[in-house]
Image (cartoon, rainbow, N blue to C red):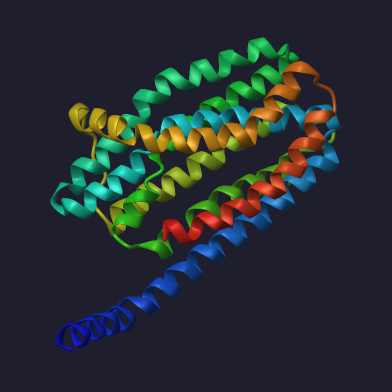
Amino acid sequence: MALFALLKGRIAHLVSDRGPKLLQDLASLVTGQAASMLLGFVAFAYLARVLDPEAYGLVEYAIAVAALAAIIIECGAGNIAVRELAKRPEDARTLATAVPLARFMLALIVVPLAAASTLLADLPPEGLVLVWLYALSATGVALKQDWLLQGYERMNQAAFAQPIRTGVFALGIILLVGSGSGLAVVGAIEIVSVLAVSTYLLWAQHRWTVPFRLALPFREAFYLIREGAAVGLSNGLWAVMLYAPVIMLTSLVGGAGPAWLGAAQRLVISMVTLSCIYHFN
């Protein structure tokens, strides 16, 4: 009976103290993701109207290449850092510099390989430029410090990140892309959107967690890469299943096929993304 009373009291304590915050955080994340999905839908629906099918297919191809590169660069370091932060809160400053360092080291290898891989796809010159720009944008993953906001239970602030990126992208696409625009403009807008969200996350880190500082904790960075390899591999396999068809179709056939596949797949990926919000919270 004493044990039952203890468990009952503990459950009541968790529900009263944590329940409302968990629901509030989850609502913030869902709202932010829903806003991001809506903005993304507007941006890509507009692109599908102003670009011809072949050009839109190249955009989807570039996004697929950059997405795979970003998964490898992320390498599960954020997940491991959240775990380590929970165990060792006093090491927050070191972790906050080790995660970007680990990702930058991987980006130095992955970004050139991702861009160079397009030489096998026999893309037109504007397609090559677009993929290079998108591959460079994947470097922004290194400064994606939303894991730090997660570790400090700042979910409301973390929820703003994705809408900022898609909002800047959608605004740039609507204002700057027309029927006569080159694909390089789309790649440049993607880089600006990545810079915008990276700037916000660094500011949020400084404001609500630990100040940003420049350091080179190589030992901790290699530890995060080693520990996060399994997580990164799992995420990588999932990303390959999603994006490999567009890459293969563009490389083998080209034409308008990748545009139709990429547009349909984009809707499915958006729905799947919603299922990740609960686990992030």
| The C terminus, quarter of image | bottom left
Q: Is residue 106 left or right of residue 132?
A: left
Residue 109 image offset from top left, x and y in percent: 42, 18
Position of residue 257 relative to residue 152, above or below, is above
Most foreground residue, 164 or 70: 70
Residue 175 in sight in this render: no
Name the residue furthest front. Answer: 1
| The N terminus, quarter of image | bottom left
Residue drawn at the location 76% of the way across and 17% of the way down: 252
Residue drawn at the location 30% of the way across and 37% of the way down: 99
Most foreground residue, 178 or 34: 34
Residue 78 in sight in this render: yes
Position of residue 123 relative to residue 2, above or below, is above
Q: Is residue 264 left or right of residue 133?
A: right
Most foreground residue, 13 or 62: 13
Residue 43 image offset from top left, x and y in percent: 71, 47
Q: Quadrant of residue 108?
A: top left
Residue 171 image offset from top left, x and y in percent: 66, 49
Residue drawn at the location 18% of the way across and 28% of the way down: 219
Number of marks drawn:
0
Most foreground residue, 172 or 219: 219
Position of residue 271 relative to residue 29, above or below, is above
Q: Quadrant of residue 35?
A: bottom right
